[in-house]
């Protein structure tokens, strides 16, 4: 079956590279803008009854779960040949990931600013911040992978016979969710 002109245009390598570049700029720019807005408009402290966990981490955890659910649904939709539903769930995953980035950056800032400098070398806070920052780096890769899969999904690259990239992206996202739960557990134990 011949592909449509739109699908042929979307599959061109130079078009894909431009779309990947610009969508990456938009996603991370929006996440950074959200973090900046939160920094400007709120107080960067952790309430005493939260221990070592900023409230922003609770919100970002929900967003991580929502993104995981969206990708799981996208995987089910592509397996069932429901292209529109597949693309819609990919977009919801991107939205959840973008919001996660912004709120997570704000939460890291709150975590760093809420601790005394004298405790940085002896306390567990530096270790927790490093774990959260490493998770953030891995999440950056996962979000770029999701951008890649989304662009390819809108170019009709995946179907019920070939969806390996969607499956790997989904499981990578799930693994990051489990790693984040482990980091939260360390924060709770340390608190």
Image: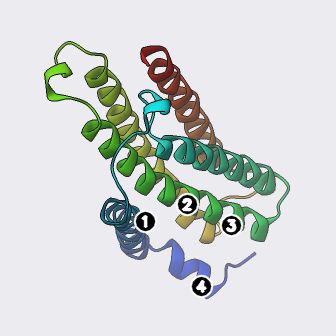
Q: Which mark is residue 6?
A: 4
Farthest residue in the bottom direction?
Answer: 5
The mark closer to the camera, 2 or 4, is 2
Residue drawn 71% across and 47% down? 69
Which residue is tagged 2? 94
Element at badge 1? Answer: helix
Which residue is tagged 1? 27
Q: Sequence-wise, which precedes: disc 2 or disc 3? A: 3
Residue drawn 39% across and 71% down? 26
Q: Badge 3: few (under 14), some or many (20 or more) residues near its Cα, within 10 Å? A: many
Count of number-bearing discs = 4
Q: Sequence-wise, which precedes: disc 1 or disc 4? A: 4
Q: Badge 1: few (under 14), some or many (20 or more) residues near its Cα, within 10 Å? A: many
- The answer to whether one can see residue 157 in this image is no
Horizontal and vertical percent for residue 82? Answer: 82, 64
Residue drawn 76% across and 75% down? 1
Horizontal and vertical percent for residue 126? Answer: 26, 24
Q: Badge 4: few (under 14), some or many (20 or more) residues near its Cα, within 10 Å? A: few
User: Which residue is nearer to you in this view: 186 or 163?
Assistant: 186
Marks 2 and 4, how far apart in space? 22 Å
- Looking at the figure, which quarter contains the C terminus? top left
Q: In this view, does 124 lie above or below 138?
A: above
Marks 4 and 3, how far apart in space? 16 Å
Marks 2 and 1, how far apart in space? 8 Å
Horizontal and vertical percent for residue 73? Answer: 76, 51
Element at badge 2? Answer: helix
Marks 2 and 3, how far apart in space? 11 Å
Q: Sequence-wise, which precedes: disc 3 or disc 1? A: 1
User: Which residue is nearer to you in this view: 191 or 136?
Assistant: 191
Marks 3 and 1, how far apart in space? 17 Å
Residue 57 relative to residue 86: left or right: left
Q: Sequence-wise, which precedes: disc 4 or disc 3? A: 4
């Amino acid at each position: 079956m011949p592909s449509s002109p739109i699908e042929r245009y979307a599959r061109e390598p130079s078009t894909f590279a431009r779309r990947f570049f610009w969508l990456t700029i938009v996603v991370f720019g929006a996440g950074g803008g959200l973090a900046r807005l939160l920094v400007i408009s709120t107080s960067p402290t952790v309430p005493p009854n939260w221990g070592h966990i900023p409230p922003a981490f609770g919100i970002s955890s929900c967003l991580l779960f929502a993104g995981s659910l969206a990708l799981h649904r996208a995987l089910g939709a592509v397996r069932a040949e429901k292209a529109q539903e597949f693309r819609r769930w990919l977009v919801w995953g991107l939205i959840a990931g973008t919001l996660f980035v912004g709120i997570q950056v704000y939460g890291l800032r709150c975590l760093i600013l809420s601790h005394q400098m004298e405790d940085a070398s002896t306390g567990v806070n530096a270790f927790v911040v490093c774990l959260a920052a490493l998770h953030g780096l891995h999440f950056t890769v996962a979000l770029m992978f999701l951008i890649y899969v989304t662009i390819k999904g809108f170019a009709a690259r995946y179907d019920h016979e070939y969806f390996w990239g969607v499956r790997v992206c989904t499981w990578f996202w799930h693994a990051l969710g489990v790693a984040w739960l482990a980091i939260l557990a360390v924060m709770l134990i340390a608190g």
